[in-house]
Amino acid sequence: MKRRVLVATGGGDCPGLNAVIRAIVKRAQKEPNWEVVGSINAFDGILTEPQEIVVLDEEKVSGIHIRGGTIIGTTSKGGPFEWPIKNSDGSWTTADRSDDMIRRLQYLGVEAVINIGGDGSQKISKMFHEKGANFVGVPKTIDNDLSATDFTFGFQTAMQEATNAVDKLVTTAASHNRVFVLEVMGRYAGWIALNAAIAGGADVALIPEIPYDINCVVNKINSRFDKDRGFAIIVIAEGAKPANGQMHYAESNEIGYKNIRLGGIATKLINQLKEAGIETDMRETVLGHLQRGGTPIAFDRILATQFGVKAFEMVMEKKYGQMVAYHHPNIVSVPLDDAISRYNHVNPDSDLAKTARGIGICLGD
Ligand code: F6P
């Protein structure tokens, strides 16, 4: 019987997931005795009845490196340690099914698991590792908020999408003498917003790491208008917040979905600007999941492919409890502990932030 490695993709999807899956399969096929299987929708494929496990062979992964999403599906809800169970009254509770999952993996003859996901997924990898299961992590997220790796794949594609949006908004803003506020993703990190603002030549970039003073934003906008002629572009991260204020979010009532849903800060900012005396026409654009869907750019395809090859080699070397990471120019393995112990935030004193300030971008402080 062949040795089996199981692959799962968990959390929000991300451009490059399919390139990782393809690379794992291609690398495994160079070995005489390995088989790759995929669990559908993260670990739901193992834990639900009937199980949904697919054999991933060369034919299944052919050409998928250019496709967005994940061919084995994903979910942001629940997980083996907090499996959602709906009560008869409509409320829900959770159960720890991690032991059940380990038994099921053994029954399926799975020797190791490659878990491709963000911080939530890598916490799950670590918890399984501590229970003696053989897990290797692969970091993914458009937010680039995982520490221990220079970049996660998917981030560059998201940043490019956000930059394309700035480019487009510049032409319409200039034509109408308007202020445009572009809200981008990133959760508690401002990587997408700050980079897109620099690349697109925005006037203001507001990020979670620097709570903004509305008066600074007002002054910057005014400096961009001569009488009523001019325009301004503001890129705001979904997790940005005013000084002494709160992030804008909604609690989710989806069963098993633990994340808060960030969003709405662009509208809030426009209202604040009106209150602070800006009379110019203002419009908002919320880029949303356009940043996550679609074809990965070349950088992300390459990084994802490197991660996939390395992850399989880590399985062969039994480097469990570790995560693949990019330490330029090398692809290395790091302890899962290092990866999830802290978030990767934008440092307000970093060279990137200094560059933004250096070309006159207002960071709200
Ligand atoms: O973590 C990736 C991400 O796209 C965040 O940038 C965003 O806040 C969140 O996921 C959106 O999640 P969902 O697709 O579940 O609404």
Image (cartoon, rainbow, N blue to C red):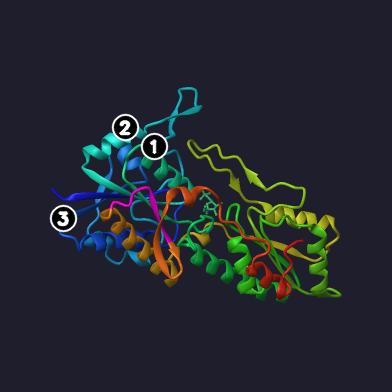
Nearer to us in this view, 229 or 121: 121
- Name the residue type under label 2: Asp
Task: Identify the magenta region.
Answer: 318-325
**Residue 307 as seen in the image, left or right of residue 252:** left
Return the residue at label 2: 100
Quarter of the image where the C terminus is located: bottom right
Q: Quadrant of residue 196?
A: bottom right
Position of 64 compared to 149: left or right? left
Residue type highlighted by circle 3: Asn
Q: Secondary structure at mark 3?
A: loop
**Gap between marks 3 and 2 measured at Cα:** 27 Å
Which residue has dot 1 on it?
80
Label 1 crowd bin: few (<14), some (14–19), many (20+), radius 10 Å: many
Picture coordinates of residue 339 (x, y %)? 48, 52
Label number found at residue 33: 3
Q: Earlier in the sequence, mark 3 or mark 2?
A: 3
Image vertical order of residue 150 relative to residue 243, above or below? below
Badge 1 element: loop
The residue sitting at 35% across, 63% down in the picture is 19
